[in-house]
Amino acid sequence: MQIKDLAFKQFINKSKIQEAVRGLAQQINTDYKEKTPVFLPILNGSFIFAADLIKQIEIPCKVSFVKVSSYAGTVSSGQLKTLIGMDASLFNQDVIVVEDIVDTGHTLQKIVEELKSLGTKSVEVVALLRKEHAREKMINVKYTGFEIENEFVVGYGLDYDGLGRNLKEIYKAAN
């Protein structure tokens, strides 16, 4: 499959994605059974994952959104730009950040620091994908769907220059 100047091949099929989402939701349902967490999906990339995950959550919960950007083309710029902030107080709340992919971890670290500075009770992260760099830096992601190497991926909310988010499966750049 071709998107702009890059060729992609299937990497993770839709049944494996849905199986991972169900497993993550089960873990969260168990861990937060006596709590009412606030899910904080990071837009734009996590919107499909977040929707599928939250539909599987059986405990009381709230949902708010934040939009940040740190990408320039196919690599993380490391610069966090908050585009749209949170519209609800997170003071004394259990927050679960929902990420599509944790790449370098720079953006996630800054988000978690900012959330903790707002007086949250707890902050955990659920990510569909976590790359090797984030594992090497020991970026704390409590709930991870798939551990991947340093692949450039699209589909299921992930994009290449705005394209490919609508794909039902995850594709990686073909070398």
Image (cartoon, helix red, strand yellow):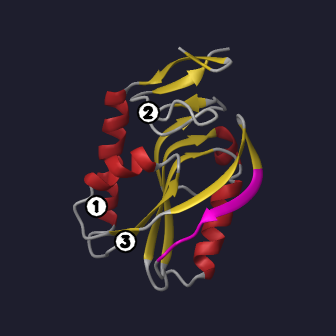
- Residue 174's spot in the image, x, y percent? 62, 15
Measured Cα–Cα span from mark 2 to mark 3: 28 Å
Amino acid at the residue labelled 3: Pro
Secondary structure of the residue carrying tag 1 is helix
What residue type is disc 1 on?
Asn
Task: Tell me if residue 35 can be seen.
Answer: yes
Which quarter of the rendering shows the C terminus?
top right
The answer to whether residue 138 is seen in the rendering is no
Q: CA distance from mark 1 to mark 2?
A: 27 Å
Main structural element of the magenta stretch: helix, strand or loop?
Answer: strand
- Tally the numbered discs: 3
Left or right, 68 with respect to 167, comes to: right
Q: CA distance from mark 3 to mark 1?
A: 10 Å
Mark sitting earlier along the chain (1/2): 1
Residue at mark 1: 29
* Residue at image mark 3: 37
**What is the span of residues highlighted in magenta in the rendered image?**
78-87
Q: Is residue 22 above or below residue 140?
A: above
Q: Which residue is found at the position 52% from the left and 46% from the top?
A: 45
Q: Earlier in the sequence, mark 3 or mark 1?
A: 1
